Amino acid sequence: MCPVKSYRMGQCANSISSRRIRITGPARRTPSPRETLNGARRTDLIRTKQSKLGNFQTRFCPQKSHFSTHLSPKTGFASGHDSLCEVANNQSPQHLVARMGQLKVESAFEVLVRARALEKQGRSIIHLEIGEPDFPTPPHIIEAGKRALDEGYTKYGPTAGLPELRESIARYVSRTRGIPVGLDNVCVVPGAKPIMFFSMLALLEPGVECIYPDPGFPIYESMIRFTGATPVAIPLVESRGFSFDLDLFRSKLSDRTRMVILNSPQNPTGGTIPPEDMAQLAAMLRDRDVIVLSDEIYSRLCYDGTPVSIASFDGMQDKTIILDGFSKTYSMTGWRLGYGVMPLWLADAVNTLMVNSNSCTAGFTQRAGIAALEGPQDCVDQMAAEFRKRRDAVCAGLNTIPGFRCPLPTGAFYAFVNVEGTGISSKELADYLLNEAGVACLNGGAFGAHGEGYIRFSYANSLPNLLEAVERIKKVSPHWSQRQ
Ligand SMILES: Cc1ncc(COP(=O)(O)O)c(C=O)c1O
């Protein structure tokens, strides 16, 4: 068994309650009469002052005469206190375990809800917030999914995925990354996200550290905190094409580092880690007792050559989880189909988590996945070419707006624009652009502290809409340019 497997993995057959007690260790006691409200017991709100996970405290709220939950500002859950105060008389939220306070949501979905609400009021909104290709799923893939339904792929299937899809993925990853991959290295899951979730549950625990990029996909930090491990954010540097400062990276490695998350091409910056940086990262990590979670979901959307996987470097395949899937490459976000490629001992653990949670991924979706990998690839090339055209146009347009600086992204479909020159915080500006210009976009700060001062525009929208968005922003730009 690999030494980096977390203690939690030995408990899958145990009851949830005993697992909960071991992880959060809440100290329970009988409340005094003063600690009850209208005679109702509030024991479920009583927890240790500082749980093992840290950042979560429960105390008696004198103003409102009940127990309330305070979350550290570090978690970004400022609303925790108020919302839990307000619901103190309802039953269920009181039973939430401490670690639930560590989970974050994706701001893209929140902004989408606000944008839709404005549309309901009759406002015209251009959606540049959501990270999903606007193209339909290619017809031959849809046909394969329909055919599979007719053929009866409507039942439970193998937990790790259909062997024919795993074979197909193994061949594809071997070819694209230049490494030998076997069917047993492949875990098929519903969307790529569960690979993040499962590998972190399997490998992280209190006392260990996980390095991740900042700004980065918000679920990384959320999940690291959820496991109780310590998140170690490493800033991405705009002047290096949003790659790491390698000296800083080296200085953050410690004996406690158990996992390193890489994401290239990257969300939200659109940057890619250049091959020479990747080689140095591999050299730093090769002899360490760490696992790399290499998020390569945008690997087919790269405008400057082919991105290099860290798994391709000598000695790295045995310590790397490649996360990839069908959502972005084949415009299949709603099909929920993704996979991880990893060492066998870890694949066993991920499959165990999968059987404990999902049982299996939908069979007809997997059949569509085979058609995607084995069928014609010109649909992917056409999509990438279209994204490239839009990237060039939208970045050129955004660079004409006062106070905006838009570096040319090398991958994915995001422009990460430095807006410090506007003199307005990126949060305020993103809100202003939604409300006043009708352009939905995301505050870079939602991707980590080092994303402050940036706004992410997804160019997964038509060229005319993108140009219209630029015009709309230009129109409202006197709001900040005339203030200076
Ligand atoms: C960097 C990154 N990784 C993983 C995912 C999740 O992909 P999926 O929708 O297949 O779960 C996303 C989705 O936006 C992403 O941006």
Image: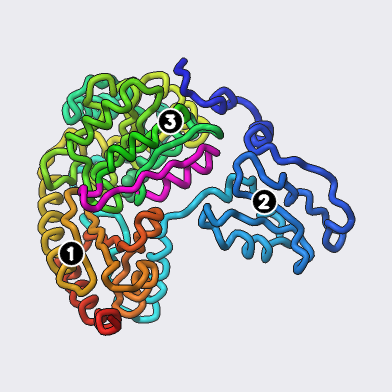
Please state if 164 lies on the left or on the right of 306 as rendered. right
Magenta region: which residues?
216-242
Query: Which amino acid type corresponds to the residue marked 2 in the rendered image?
Result: Gln
Give the structural element (helix, strand or loop) at label 2. strand
Q: For this view, does 476 lie left or right of residue 95?
A: left
- Secondary element type, mark 3: loop
Looking at the rendering, in which quadrant would you find the C terminus?
Answer: bottom left
Q: CA distance from mark 1 to mark 2?
A: 47 Å
Q: Is residue 237 magenta?
A: yes
Locate residue 191: give its quadrant. top left
Is the residue marked by circle 3 packed among few (<14), some (14-19), or many (20+) residues within 10 Å? few
Q: In which quarter of the view is residue 338 placed?
A: top left
Which disc number belongs to residue 254? 3
Which is in the foreground here, disc 1 or disc 2? 2
Relative to 413, residue 111 above or below: below
Residue 197: image location, x then y, percent: 45, 38
The residue at the point 18 percent across, 42 percent down is 300
- Identified at 25% across, 49% down, the residue is 242
